[in-house]
């Protein structure tokens, strides 16, 4: 996830079609899908062992926190210059990154607690520290600019950690666990690619390239949320 800049007349930024038109509808579908998946993961299956239920609960929190991040990114683009803040855009983005960090950390937590205990919660602690830094920026103790620079490291780092942990499970786990780990890696790949496509540089550059083709641009902007839908459904299929 990389900060998407709001459109600023005479300066540049995201085209007005971003988070509007068809791509916004697809984004809404992805948001609803994430919430539905979280609800399903909270459902206790008959005969399910307690450990499996707790792992699913951690995954459900990942889905909830991640989609809250997406919602605040939308709010940031829509309300990027509110009178109550010198830069409300940065404020909303930092809140979004806090939720993203919490979501990734909740996923790392269940892996370290129930699947790979040899790491002694080191990566969970890293995620928790990063989450605290985002929170301190939100309440004004740290500058938002500083924490936004941190975002270029935190989300990719935590994502790499998750990939590393599931690669370990795919190599060391039993047959069924290995299959699920590989499937979850595929889901993470879809979500990760969506985040890259939805990044600042691509959003702006594609907007410039397709400025005269609004429908095509709208459809291109729909790819990221479409990938998110695919990713979270693959994730659900292999975790519920």
Image: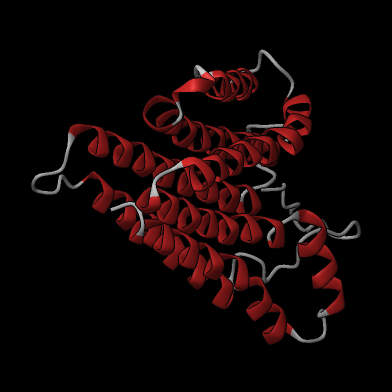
Against 50, residue 18 (above or below) is: below
Residue 158 percent location from the top left of the image? 62, 35
* Extreme residue toward the right, this view: 10
In the image: residue 234, left or right of residue 87: left
Residue 225 percent location from the top left of the image? 55, 65
> Which residue is depicted at the point 49% across and 41% down?
172
The answer to which of 112 and 154 lies nearer the viewer is 112
> Which residue is depicted at the point 32% across and 37% down?
55
Is residue 76 in view from this perspective? yes
In the image: residue 121, left or right of residue 35: right
The answer to which of 99 and 236 lies nearer the viewer is 236
Residue 236 percent location from the top left of the image? 35, 57
Q: How many marks?
A: 0
> Which residue is depicted at the point 40% across and 31% down?
110
Residue 234 percent location from the top left of the image? 42, 63
> Which residue is depicted at the point 81% across and 58% down?
13
In the image: residue 152, left or right of residue 178: right
The answer to which of 204 and 47 lies nearer the viewer is 47
């Amino acid at each position: 996830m990389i900060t998407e800049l709001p459109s600023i007349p005479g300066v540049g930024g995201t085209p007005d079609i971003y988070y509007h038109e068809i791509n916004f509808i697809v984004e809404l579908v992805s948001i609803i899908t994430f919430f539905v998946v979280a609800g399903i993961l909270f459902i206790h299956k008959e005969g399910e062992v307690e450990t499996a239920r707790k792992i699913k609960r951690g995954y459900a929190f990942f889905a909830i926190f991640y989609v809250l991040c997406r919602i605040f990114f939308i709010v940031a683009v829509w309300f990027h210059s509110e009178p109550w803040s010198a830069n409300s855009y940065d404020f909303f983005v930092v809140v979004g990154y806090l939720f993203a960090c919490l979501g990734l950390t909740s996923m790392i937590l269940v892996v370290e607690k129930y699947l790979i205990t040899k790491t002694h919660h080191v990566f969970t602690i890293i995620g928790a520290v990063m989450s605290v830094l985002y929170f301190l920026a939100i309440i004004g103790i740290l500058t938002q600019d500083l924490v936004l620079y941190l975002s270029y490291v935190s989300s990719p780092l935590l994502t790499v950690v998750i990939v590393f942990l599931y690669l370990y499970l795919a190599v060391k786990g039993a047959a069924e666990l290995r299959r699920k780990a590989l499937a979850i890696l595929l889901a993470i790949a879809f979500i990760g690619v969506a985040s890259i496509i939805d990044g600042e540089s691509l959003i702006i550059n594609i907007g410039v390239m397709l400025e005269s083709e609004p429908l095509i641009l709208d459809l291109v902007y729909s790819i990221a949320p479409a990938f998110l839908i695919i990713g979270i459904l693959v994730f659900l299929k292999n975790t519920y």
